[in-house]
Image (cartoon, rainbow, N blue to C red):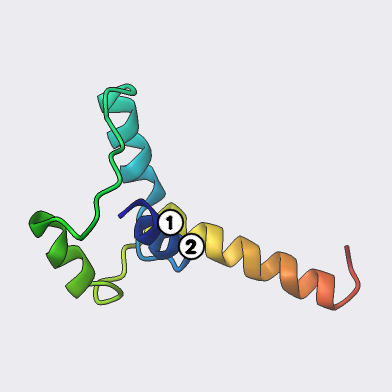
Amino acid sequence: MLDITRVEAMRGLVDFGRIEQMLDRIGGRFDHIPLPRVPPLAAPLFLEVGKVPVKGRAEDALIERERAALMQAAGLT
């Protein structure tokens, strides 16, 4: 799920601000346990991937990345 979240964040479908707030709220009190298969409560996340774009810092990050790529392609960096 973390990998999917990272990919969706890079595509602008996850709001970085909300993720940061959640991580601040839990303050490192979580366990990462790799599972042999998708847990039942995660299945809806896989079915909804890419359907609902979220505006916010992710969108700004994508715009900045594209701007930097265009500047580099134009030889202006």
Instruction: Find numbered disc 1 in the image and state the secondary structure of the residue it sits on.
Output: helix
- The residue lying toward the viewer, choosing from 65 and 27, is 27
Instruction: Find numbered disc 2 in the image and state the secondary structure of the residue it sits on.
Output: helix
The tag on residue 6 is 1
- Residue lying at 73% horizontally and 65% vertically, measured from the top left: 68
What quarter of the picture does the C terminus occupy? bottom right
How many numbered circles are shown? 2
Classify 10 Å Cα crowding around label 2: few (below 14), some (14-19), many (20 and above): some
- Residue lying at 42% horizontally and 59% vertically, measured from the top left: 9
Q: Position of residue 59 (x, y in %)?
A: 46, 63
For the residues labelled 2 and 1, the Cα–Cα distance comes to 6 Å
- Residue lying at 9% horizontally and 55% vertically, measured from the top left: 41
Q: Are marks 2 and 1 in contact (CB under 8 Å)?
A: yes
- Residue lying at 28% horizontally and 40% vertically, measured from the top left: 33
Q: What kind of residue is marked 2?
A: Met
Vertical relation: 39 (above or below) 73 = above
- The residue lying toward the viewer, choosing from 41 and 69, is 41
Q: What kind of residue is marked 1?
A: Arg
Instruction: Answer with left or right where residue 1 lies relative to residue 45.
Output: right
Vertical relation: 9 (above or below) 75 = above
Q: Position of residue 39 (x, y in %)?
A: 14, 55
Q: Which residue is most to the left? A: 40
From the image, tell me which residue sits under label 2.
10
Place residue 71 in its image quadrant. bottom right
Place residue 46 in its image quadrant. bottom left
Q: Position of residue 40 (x, y in %)?
A: 8, 58
Instruction: Answer with left or right where residue 42 lies relative to residue 53.
Output: left
Q: Nearer the viewer, mark 2 or mark 1?
A: 1
